Amino acid sequence: MAYFFEEPSHTFAEYLLVPGYTSAECIPASVSLKTPVVRYKKGEECPLTMNIPLVSAVMQSVSDDRMAIALAKEGGISFIYGSQTIENQAAMVARVKSYKAGFVTSDSNIKPDQPLTDAVALKEKTGHSTIAVTEDGTANGKLCGIITSRDYRINHTPSDAKVKDYMTPFANLVTGQDGITLSEANELIWNHKLNSLPIIDKNGNLKYMVFRKDYASHQEHPLELLDEKHRYIVGAGINTRDYMDRVPALLAAGVDVMTLDSSEGFTEWQRRALHDIHEKWPNAKVGAGNVVDAEGFNFLAEAGADFVKIGIGGGSICITREQKGIGRGQATATIEVAKARDEYFKKTGIYVPICSDGGIVHDYHMTLALAMGADFCMLGRYFARFDESPTNKLIVNGSYVKEYWGEGSNRARNWQRYDMGGASKLSFEEGVDSYVPYAGSLHDNVTMSMSKVRHTMCNCGVLTIPELQEKAKITLVSQASLTEGSAHDVIVKTTSIQS
Ligand code: IMP
């Protein structure tokens, strides 16, 4: 006879947190959202942690290199989508790893003999008032000087004036040598009262510029997630078909962590992929999933998954439950898998982090997922709304929207994600193509969401995620109390400044 779960499965919207005692020390500024990403042994340090518990979904419409840089600046990780060629995906990873936080390749460059009017035109085109003057006018040519809009008054210069007559020549410039750290560069900027610092190699060729204003940006991102070489941490999605080719290319590009991306992970294909990858590249970090119960978790933990993703059918663009009738309420799945993770830790001394993937609608759902035991959350719709997502921003019915489509939609045709070992094609759709309301910059939104999580944690009387998982008091709520939970029995003004 089939197995019947005794309880119906529930989703985050059916739960609330009940406050705990809040001590005077328990203030949002003291909350740490640091969380483990990959497995580690009891008593040892987790080799990869994040500073906020958010990762962006392995989706064409969500995670490319631009998203990865923006999210790493906030302390989280993007998993760059795998439904593209190995070369393209590795190139995206490489771009994240070569993006030097604070060091930029000069985008405004000119030759010394060009007329000054060219400098003015360039400034208008790029909007940047600092222009590097190089022998060949390229971003990496031999540096001859720097010209800024403070060096000339265009109405007071002869019409045949040349750049070289107004620039600060190389001999008078303060420069940094390639290899200098960002903090050393900033020391020079402060000590010499500069707005920008050119970084040159030993032959005098321009490598990068460091700008004073970028230092401020660096200060604005105290949680940014960097590797030991000060490069942004980045993840990537892989599948169970071409991993023997894809993984080495991603590792060569510098990827920090990967995840098998599949709608259903309790499979022989995932076990084999984990085995083969770890055998060939013992240091590669690979998450697996998705599962929705203890059995699925234990299978993947035993198979060597570095973390396990939870969630089937709960994604905003997902129609798997309608199409195939498989899945489970995201909250119930998270609660059961978290219990299995804790038991596995007790039994083996190995902590395998778990990720609640999909179905986060409100910010408080993130806190609930963490309180229910998730170490971090994966989100698609949430990130798709931001400037940094790879899709078009359009006006629909007078409002700005961004496009957002599922990996199982005809638009993405990511058949590997739904592969059950048969033909190389998507037999039917498991996702839709949609719009989501445009929401502005990732930085502003993530800052706000994490502020809400921190405040809620203080209401619960806790300062860390493990403490939340241990001490949270969680209650199921009735339909009537859900109605009570939003504004009711009043006429809401539309001018609220609430986000
Ligand atoms: P969201 O945050 O609710 O939008 O859910 C995002 C998650 O949905 C992803 O991380 C995937 O696990 C899942 N997903 C992505 N594309 C599809 C699809 O086409 N069908 C079903 N699930 C999908």
Image: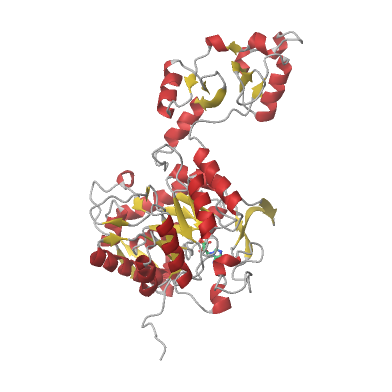
Of 398 and 162, nearer the camera is: 162
Q: Quadrant of residue 179?
A: top left
Residue that extends furthest to the front in the rendered view of this protein: 280
Task: Residue 285: give x, y in percent of width and height.
Answer: 41, 54
Seen at 53% across and 50% down, the residue is 249
Task: Residue 167: give x, y in percent of width and height.
Answer: 62, 12
When the figure is inspected, residue 2 is found, relative to residue 483, above or below; the finding is below
Seen at 31% across and 51% down, the residue is 46
Q: Quadrant of residue 1?
A: bottom left
Of 25 and 201, nearer the camera is: 201
So how many labels did they put on this image? 0
Task: Residue 51: give x, y in percent of width and height.
Answer: 38, 47
Residue that extends furthest to the right in the rendered view of this protein: 159
Seen at 67% across and 22% down, the residue is 137
Q: Determine if residue 476 is in view.
A: no
In this rendering, position of residue 26 left or right of residue 330: left
Q: Determine if residue 300 is in view.
A: yes
Task: Residue 41: give x, y in percent of width and height.
Answer: 27, 56
When the figure is inspected, residue 42 is found, relative to residue 387, above or below; the finding is below
Chosen colour scheme: secondary structure
